[in-house]
Amino acid sequence: MSIQRYGKWDFRAVDHDTAARARARLKVQGAPAEPERAAAVVLLREAPLRVFLLRHTAKEPFGVGDGGPAPGLAEHWTGAEPEADRKGRPSRYGFPGGRHKPDDPDVAMTAVREVEEETGAMVALQRAWSRWVTPEYEPVRFDSWVYVATLAEGFQPRIRVREPEYATWVGPEQAVCQYGGQMSVPEATTLAELARYSTVGEVFAAAEQRDMTPILPRLVSVGGRDRLVLPDEEGYPPAALERV
């Protein structure tokens, strides 16, 4: 069963005004934009189990990376207002990641490259965890692979690029409980899933059994409330604007 809530956060809730803008946008667009390939990486260490979390200023970190912010991503992926930094700029939390580049042999290498560019560290072991596709109503869309990974011996991640303003190692449960409102749906969901495990070995064993079918959230209205639903869930519409 897919995770919808964790702690005080309802990952799938969409406020009415945001939902109205999303529906209007897709009607204007006509056809959904073609998704770009992207990757995000959850760096792991122990003991106990910890994830490496970045705070980005004024952009949505998931599946964007170099090339600048993608318009509208923050609207559909999060239901809360972003936290402000000391200068009053909106901040969001997430993982190292970014767009696939033509020189990348595949999206797995995109993940490795993004970790090195953003943190200066090299990946030792890496496994695919999930694959998320941006809903059809966004003007810029991503087919984003989420990986779990460990660092090569002797490497410690640090901030190398200008965009991330803060980085920390934190337990997945603490991360989602404390920062879930400032994360994308895929990132918050990933952390909630990882909170079930105690060791890196358990996470990697679970990754071997994961279903990597793309997850395409769609917007529905349930009892007058707007929500994102996932494939195979009750009420998942066959088209982007059905039942809305």
Image: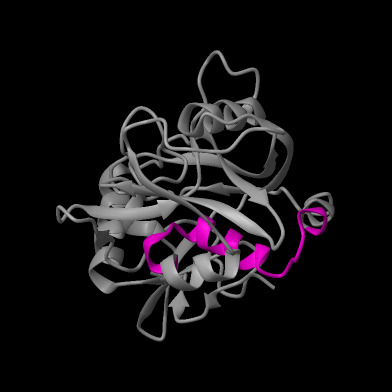
Magenta part, dominant SS: helix
| Residue 237 x %, y % | 53, 64
**Segment colored magenta:** 180-202
Q: Residue at x 55, y 74 (%)?
A: 4
Q: Quadrant of the C terminus?
A: bottom left
Left or right: residue 94 compared with residue 233: left
Find residue 160 and report its horizontal and vertical position in percent.
Answer: 41, 31
Residue at 75%, 66% (x, y): give it.
198
42 to the left or right of 23 = right
Q: Position of residue 10 (x, y in %)?
A: 46, 76
Q: Is residue 217 visible?
A: no
Question: How many numbered badges does the structure rendering display?
Answer: 0
On whether residue 186 falls in the magenta region, the answer is yes
- Residue 205 is drawn in which quadrant? bottom right
**Residue sitting at 48 percent across and 60 percent down?**
185
Residue sitting farthest toward the top: 103
Asked if the stretch drawn in magenta spans residue 23, the answer is no
